[in-house]
Amino acid sequence: MKTLREKIGQRIRQARQEKGLSQRDLGKLLGTSQVTISDMELGKPRKLDVEDLVTLARILDKPVAYFLSDVIETADKETVESLKEEARRLLARIEELEKRLAGE
């Protein structure tokens, strides 16, 4: 059975290939290396935070849910809690940005 990281990595690879990008190209767009993209696609241990996932989704023209859809259905309790915490942090950051933009 594939791990959560491996499932997400598989989706990243699929979306990258559909977009016609090499790992090097995607790395440049994401501000990282080809090796990091390869590791992400293979599901090697690396923290993939929500911000990275949102950026990947934007670059690859996919909704964030594309990377998580069947992953969430099979996730364990710890993974779900981790995803919820990441979502809370992202929402807090969005609220900070909205306040800053409203003050300009």
Image (cartoon, grey):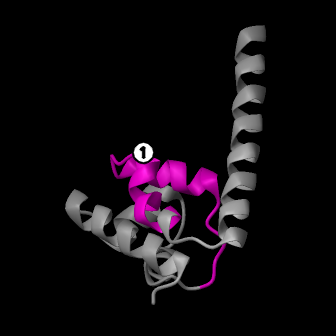
Residue 104 visible to an observer of this rendering: no
Relative to 41, residue 66 above or below: above
Q: Which of 103 and 88 lies nearest the eye of the viewer?
A: 88
88 drawn magenta: no
Residue 23: % across, % down? 36, 72
Q: Which quarter of the figure is the N terminus placed in?
A: bottom left
Relative to 61, residue 77 above or below: below
**Residue type for callout 1:** Arg
Q: Main structural element of the magenta stretch: helix, strand or loop?
A: helix
Numbered range of the magenta stretch: 45-72
Kindly indicate the quadrant of the structure image that contains residue 67: bottom left
Residue 74: % across, % down? 50, 71
User: On the rendered structure, is 76 left or right of 16?
Assistant: right
Q: Residue at x 51, y 49 (%)?
A: 55
Q: Residue at x 34, y 71 (%)?
A: 13
Q: Which of 88 and 59 lies nearest the eye of the viewer?
A: 88
Kindly indicate the quadrant of the structure image that contains residue 46: bottom right
Residue at the disc numbered 1: 58
For numbered disc 1, what is the local secondary structure?
A: helix
65 drawn magenta: yes
Kindly indicate the quadrant of the structure image that contains residue 32: bottom right
Q: Which quarter of the figure is the C terminus placed in?
A: top right
Residue 79: % across, % down? 66, 69
Q: Which of 1 and 53 lies nearest the eye of the viewer?
A: 1
**Disc 1 residue crowd, few under 14, some 14–19, many 20+, Cα 10 Å:** few
Residue 66: % across, % down? 38, 55
